[in-house]
Amino acid sequence: MESMMQAREWKCRVPQDKSEGFLEYLYATGVKDTSQTDGFLGAQIYKREADGLVEFTLITYWRDLESIKAFAGDNIGVARLYPEDDKYDLEPDLTVQHYEVIEHSFVESMSGVNN
């Protein structure tokens, strides 16, 4: 059986006044580390205001579960956190969700769009 692309979803919340700094930190830690792992295929970051905080969702895409293990360790359901997370008053989810990716297409005119 052919292995399917996997998505890994992690969420956290930070105070509004720390959200921009946290986003830069997220790129410097989680996004950088995932993108340097063999089997990493891409990432998306979502942001929304929720209950007076800013919630970030990081979704990373992987060739297979073994690639995720190379990044996260054997227990892939546990979030990988970083030493300076507390500087941002981070409220992290301590677990992550994994999904088999069934569809992953974008309308061509939307590719590369940033806000």
Image (spheres, grey):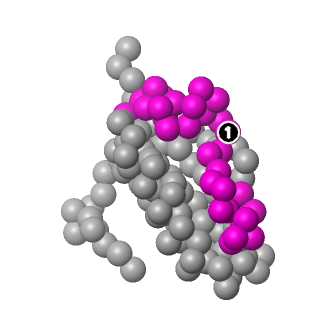
Q: Write down the residue under mark 1.
A: 78
- Most extreme residue toward the left is 108
Placement of 110 over or under 5, stated as above or below? below
Residue closest to the eye, 13 or 106: 13
Q: Is residue 47 visible?
A: no
Q: Is residue 75 magenta?
A: yes
Write the residue at 46% across / 56% down.
31
- Most extreme residue toward the front is 83
Neighbour tally class for label 1: few under 14, some 14-19, many 20 plus, Cα within 10 Å: some
Q: Is residue 13 visible?
A: yes
Q: Is residue 111 magenta?
A: no
- Most extreme residue toward the top is 1
Local secondary structure at mark 1: loop
Is 42 positioned to the left or the right of 76 in the image? left
**Which amino acid type is shown beneath numbered disc 1?**
Val
Quadrant of res 102: top left
**Tally of numbered tags:** 1
Q: Tell me where the magenta segment starts and ends, as one range.
A: 63-92
Q: Residue 113: x and y, percent?
A: 31, 72
Q: Quadrant of the C terminus?
A: bottom left
Write the residue at 35% across / 19% down.
2
Placement of 58 over or under 15, stated as above or below? above
Q: Quadrant of the N terminus?
A: top left
Q: Residue 106: x and y, percent?
A: 30, 57
Q: Residue 105: x and y, percent?
A: 31, 51
- Most extreme residue toward the right is 51
Q: Residue 27: x and y, percent?
A: 47, 64
Write the residue at 70% across / 70% down.
87
Is 32 positioned to the left or the right of 13 in the image? left
Placement of 104 over or under 70, stated as above or below? below
Residue closest to the eye, 23 or 114: 23
